[in-house]
Amino acid sequence: MSHPRHTIKIFITLLFLFFSEQHSSAAKFEFQKSIANYQIPDVVLTNQDGKKVPLIPFLDSEKPVMLEFIFATCTTICPVMSVSFTNLQRRLGKDTEKLRLVSVSIDPEHDTPSIMNKYLNRYNAQNGWDFLTGSKEDIDLIMKAFDAYVSDKMNHQPLTFMRSPEEKQWVRVNGFLSGKEMMKEYQKLIGQDL
Amino acid sequence: MNKINELLISIFVLFLTCASLPFPVQADASKTIDNSASDMIELGRKIYQDGELGDGSPVKAIVLGDIEVTGDQFTCLNCHRRSGLGGPEGTKYVLATNGGSLLVPRVDLYMERPAYTYETFAEAMTLGVNPKGTPFDPIMPIYDLPEPEMRALFGYLKTLSNKYSPGVNDVELHIATVVSKDIDPQLKNEMLQVLNAFIDNKNAQTRHEKKRYTSGPFYHEYRNKAYRQWVLHIWEVSGPAESWAGQLETYYQQQPVFAMISGVVSGDWNPIHNFSREKKLPCLLPNTDLPTIGSPADFYTLYFSKGLTLEAQTLHSDLAGNNTNGDIVQIYRQGTIGEKGAQASEKVARAGKTEIINLPLVENADWQEIKQKTIQPGVGAVVLWLGADDLEKYAEVLGEHLSSAPVYVSSSLLNGEYDLIPPPLNRAAKIIHPFKLKEDQQARLRQLEVWLKQNNISMSNPRIQGQTYFACLLLNGGLKHIKRYYYREFFLDLLDHGERMSLYSINYPRLSFGPEQRFLAKGAYIIDPATVKNHWVIPGH
């Protein structure tokens, strides 16, 4: 990297990446979006502070909600999904608390409140982002309700579910979004996509 | 936004990006980075595993095109794994980044490329394209590394999984099981019979498959597969536990093994745990109630559960849940593993504010006095870390005078056989049971019995035989997927993805697997005969 030639190459590539972002993301970021109705099960989960969280009212919030299924020791997929939540909170700045971010553990017996707390700290989570665990039976019910059930947690998909407070329906995204695209989705949720 | 604005912003962004781009070796970087080869490799390891640069600051990267990541969030290790071999993960496939893969061309259709050189590697990391110019999936981050760090990283990757681990050659795979000399010969035999029978069956099958594939149409494909004879070594240790490391070292020098499996010793597993860590030698599912509860970085030993510590934590969770007041009285026989249970419980209690009163049993213990101390006022709970014989004696002096405080019995001390609890305790005592409930175990036990019978073994000890058999299944499962990559770290990486194996568990309920998860079962039952209810407890939940 000490070669000037190298530096110029990086410069040009960044330039290229920037101007072609729209274009290249279409080619590289593969994700599917759909709309669906889900019947949320009436279960009580536990958050990173050990507080009980009844799921239905928690999701029926006056705030827009984004929900993902992850686990604390997951490789590749969850770290990237979580850092994407980190990024969204950072972009929102003061408005962070206007959005409810929910990570639901699909490895609930391992993911205790103290482990979840550490996980959220690692991702610099701000208020408004909760990590929920519960009994394995309840977690299975939730995964099934969101049509996201896998018997082996290692086979899970990168799913993000989004809902605006006025809507009954959820937007289901399967795949990864760039920070910019994620922000766009948020703006759609609050009716500000221009 | 109009084009001019966009252009201005982009120039600004580029300015910021370039300003933060590392330029030729910074003056202070040369201070922190010693150039000796092993220091460079250690620096590379730190970048790869801990996400730290030479000066201790976190590595920075961009993922998904525009999202900043720092090394304390995730590192190469989180995706490429400890072995560097990567592998499938949900819908993604993580390519290998170990020396053996990077330094040779990839001829697969997917992401075909020539071998990496330092220059093309540095380009790949900073630009996100392989040497053929194919861009990576955007979940492979783009890294911002100073040159000395980039070189150190490449140097480390070259050493990562670059030659087979010791204990395996083209025809044999060596494994060892550790036993201590003072262990009950019957127990030792029960374990060894299962290991030997499993391995004999496996080797017979291997001979058959080898014949088929050395000539058949699949010869090439299967040539490097796991068709090696397994050779079991029994490493018997004796004398004081402090001397075991030396004895194990001697065995290892005579014949290195690829992994240790099962095993049974008197006392703590710690000497073997440490040997496993120091030798980077996998140790699969030892038969112990006294595992080492080390840091998550203790990657090499995989346990069924935290054993007596799990029981102790479960006990105190239950006590806290029931708002128990008063002293906790513990009875155990001195010098037995019951004492270890009591100590584990004391350690857990110290974190809270419960008062513990220990009643160690010695030769000719005064049972009347012990009984008095357990039924007097002020006792919040009685915990019996006792084997079947001592439970019998305690029950005898009790007669019908049960303590009004709740009484707990450790199931591990009964080998899980809680039917051995004598009356009146069996009607009142809560059982801390870190195993499957009897009724949930039936089907798997029957299968085990059939298998044992086929091998002329009678089922005399479902716990040790079941645990050992499951350890063999896990070993076999891992090796089935190892293909030709006989690296110990890869083997353990594979086991971390072994969630489906939990279906076959005979003794332990609800196993869960994953990197950093070294204790497969996380909870225990509290069986309460008074209410005929079982309560599943996961400490910390």
Image (cartoon, coloured by chain):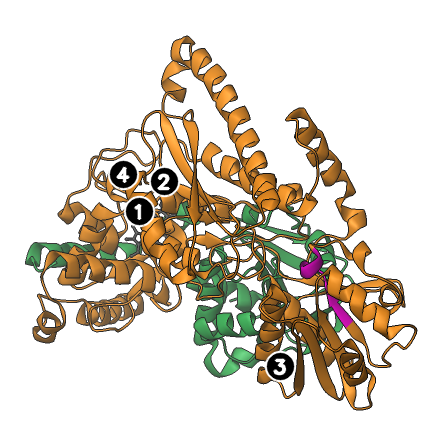
Q: Residue at position x 22%, y 67% from top?
A: B14
Counting from the top left corner in percent of width and height, residue A149 is at: 66, 49
Find the distance from the CA under tag 1 to the CA under tag 4: 34 Å
Q: Give amino acid for label 2.
A: Val
Dot 1 and dot 4 within a common chain = yes
Seen from this angle, which residue lies furthest bottom?
B378
Please give the chain letter of the residue carrying mark 4: B
Please say whether residue B541 is visible from this viewpoint.
Answer: no
Counting from the top left corner in percent of width and height, residue B113 is at: 25, 35
First along the sequence among labels 1 and 4: 4
Seen from this angle, which residue lies furthest right?
B400
Find the distance from the CA under tag 3 to the CA under tag 1: 41 Å
Please give the chain letter of the residue carrying mark 3: B
First along the sequence among labels 4 and 2: 4
Residue B128 belongs to magenta span: no
Give, as a single range, the part of the protein colored magenta: B408-414
Classify B240 as above or below B189.
Answer: below
Find the distance from the CA under tag 2 to the CA under tag 1: 12 Å
Q: Which residue is mark 4?
A: B101
Q: Specify the quadrant of the image occupied by residue B482.
A: top left
Task: Specify the label residue B349 is tagged with.
Answer: 3
Q: Nearer the viewer, mark 3 or mark 1?
A: 1
Q: Which residue is mark 1?
A: B250
Find the distance from the CA under tag 4 to the CA under tag 2: 25 Å
Q: Are marks 3 and 4 in contact (CB under 8 Å)?
A: no
Q: Give amino acid for label 3.
A: Ala
The kind of secondary structure element at disc 1 is: helix
Quarter of the figure with the N terminus of chain A: bottom left
First along the sequence among labels 3 and 4: 4
Dot 3 and dot 4 within a common chain = yes
